[in-house]
Image: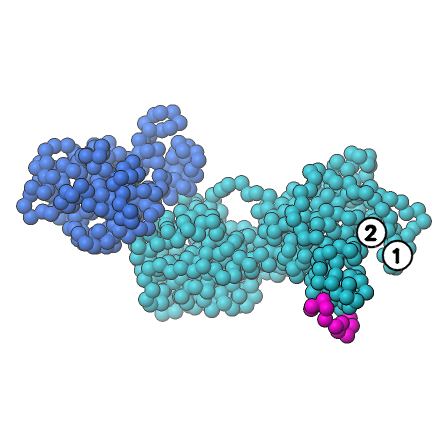
Chain colours: A blue, B cyan
Amino acid sequence: MAPGHPDLGGGEGAQAAATLFEGLRETGGVHPVLLSSIGRSWPALFKPGAHITAFDARPHQYLFLSHDIDPLWHRNREPLLVEAYAEFLRLTAPGVVHFFDFATFGIELLSLTRRILPSCRIVVSFQDALAICAADGSLVRRVDGTACNGASPVRCHHCIPERTPEDMFLRARWMMAHLAAADVFIVPSAVLRGEYGRFGLPAERLVQLGTAGPPEAMASTYLALYRAPA
Amino acid sequence: MNAHEQDPPAVSSPASSLRPPDFDDALYLMLNQDVAGAVAAGAYASGEAHYLAHGAREGRRYLPPLDEPVLPQGPVVLSLALVPAAPGFTPAPAARLMAHAVEALRVSAGGGVFVSGWIDDAADPLLELRIEGEGWSTSLAGGMLARVRRRDVEAVVSTSEPHGFGFWSFAELGHPILRSRRCRVHLRTARGVGVALDVECRGIGDIELRSLVLAGLVENDWFDSAWTAAGIGLDGGTGDQIVALNRRITAGAVADPVVQHFGPAGGTPTASIIVCLYGRPEYLPLQCALFAGGAGMEGCEFVYVSNSPDLADRLLRDARIASLVHGTRITLVLLSGNAGFAAANNVAMRYARSERIIICNPDVIPLQPDWAQRHAELVATLPAERTALFGLPLFYETGALMHGGMYFEIDASVLTQPGGLAARETVRVQHYGKGAPPDTADYLRARPVPAVTGAFISCRRDVYERLGGFNEDYVFGHYEDADFCLRAIGLGITPWLHDVRMYHLEGQGSARHAAQQGAMIVNRWLFARTWAARVRDGLLGPEPSHKMMRTPAPRRRR
């Protein structure tokens, strides 16, 4: 589950997902599928009536035609897209679903994945602190530009006054409710590992891993993670 | 009837005996061409003859239809004319003209009439204000005619004595009426001086009229506290009229709701969670997500009812997604207008399938993930009388207790007004432990309480039905929960509090607009009028003496 595709100008997450896909494809006994979300910046790739569609005739690569994602709750508000994703899961029946992003898919797809595929392993890679911090996941306080040393309903309201402390409290619980569906969380740094630990994610499910490297190495590393006992 | 048909035998009815004061024969014939033809053919002597015999009863127009005239801004002082006094009143020899103005006259097609203005009646008090429209009239007198302060008039009149020069009233006629461009307004004083005015009349929708009247309760310049003064004003009859108007609007809003079901339909749910949405649609997916997955939730269904028609499409989409994501049965009831808390819950109840009904606010979420299982265990194991109707401790997101049951206090206030003092009582609903530390055992322990908040009420379906649901007289929302519990006590059903914990994210929210504040005044007035005596009878204070409030010895059903 990639936030974009490198061939369409995607960022680090898109590159990491594509590299991993490439490495896994060369690994025996593994059948990876790449689902890249793209937004309205590529309207020509949106097929009328389709919500998930093949990408450029490339085997096992698909586009998730994303739109109408709520910017605060990172919630997908298009039922047809959510239903298409559920159908996609049923058709592909993966043993592992790895989210390199939730913001362009909608975070409730984590819970939906767990409900459709109760025994699959769900992995989430965080690129930033978006689940914790409504200020674009930066953990930098908008009021004075200093590093945030701890999100809380009141501190987040101080940073984003148009949102009440109750909203911020709800946002944190909303995120946690869906993240609870995941088995493993991958963070790129010790700092983010600490932040997500303080946020409430179980320490034993937080794994620090880099997202760069050749395809084979990435495939080897992530396969070991996918196959590790729960 | 066809204007050319033979006259039927004369029938005595109010309509057939009245000739409207502003009836104009030529205008009537112009507006009713078939009557004009009948008069020309000799079937009737005149248009008036037809109107008195048939036209009034048939609802025929004698004034042009309303086309929403634009009223001039600011006060309108109308010309003055002495008219013959009403029968039975002898004008005093010294009767003189009084300066006055009818500044606003609003009429809704459903039968609501609002009027406001002022009169210099310090020497000869205004006794009655009578409004006559096309085929209808209403008399506003005594308590129905609220008097308010008008500082602008005081400045012109140069009075040293405080006097309520302003008048303000609302009447709900109880039947649809024709709205016309002008109405006749009669002012009559205690000395018998009568003044008749032709007043431009503006048509208004029922909902806008309700807002206008409710806002008036707050925005009028009363002589003292608006809460007290407006409450006293409502006693005179206006309060009942506002309740009647609100009832009419509510009935329209709940008629023919759009109902959609999402998710699995099979089986009878263990509990139906009814949630009335107040305009923030995102609460639906948020609440579903935060309830989902907890032990015991698999047997529950949600019934969401929306008071905001503009959110219907959004809610349909969100309910569809939430049901798919969580596998939850969701019923969405979409109303055509804001029916308020009581009526919305009552209509949603029709679509709940469980014998256990939970009324829940959209901003209530579990503090304990297994709350549903705990709730089900309480219902299964406790004596039935302790779970017939109960609430839970609710907590703020700050960790402090928000609600540990409710009790009642009575406050007295005195209003200084022209003519002396007026005393008034209000019943204040208090939450046990509001703001208390989270583990304050006294507020958390299971016990009978006078009332529980409507933010979370669990009750048996038969109890809800026996009570007839929430009282729909309250406007928008507030006090229905306490009213519900007091009615239950009246039937021998004790409200309980049991220790299963939830969050209630009750916040300050956006500022209440004047109509909402006015609704609060009406509700407070209504609640006090209905329940003050009952509350005083053993249900007063945080430790009420009522026999049903005594905590029985602990015991389990099994």
Q: Could you tell whether A9 is left or right of A177 in the image?
A: left
B60 vs B345, nearest the viewer: B60
Of the residues shown, which amino acid type is indicated by label 2?
Arg
Nearer the N terminus, badge 2 or badge 1?
1
Q: State the extent of the magenta-drawn residues as a range.
A: B1-12
Q: Quick check: B305 above or below B120?
A: below
B539 vs B25, nearest the viewer: B25
Of the residues shown, which amino acid type is indicated by label 1?
Phe
Res B89 label? 1
Residue B165 in which image quadrant: top right
**x 91%, y 55%: residue:** B90
A82 vs B472, nearest the viewer: A82
User: In the rendered picture of this protein, how many numbered marks are placed on residues?
Assistant: 2
Q: Could you tell whether B239 is left or right of A204 in the image?
A: right
Query: Can residue B406 be seen?
Result: no
Point out residue B49 in the picture as x, y percentages from the top left corner.
Answer: 79, 64
Residue B246 in which image quadrant: bottom right
Dot 2 corresponds to which residue?
Answer: B188
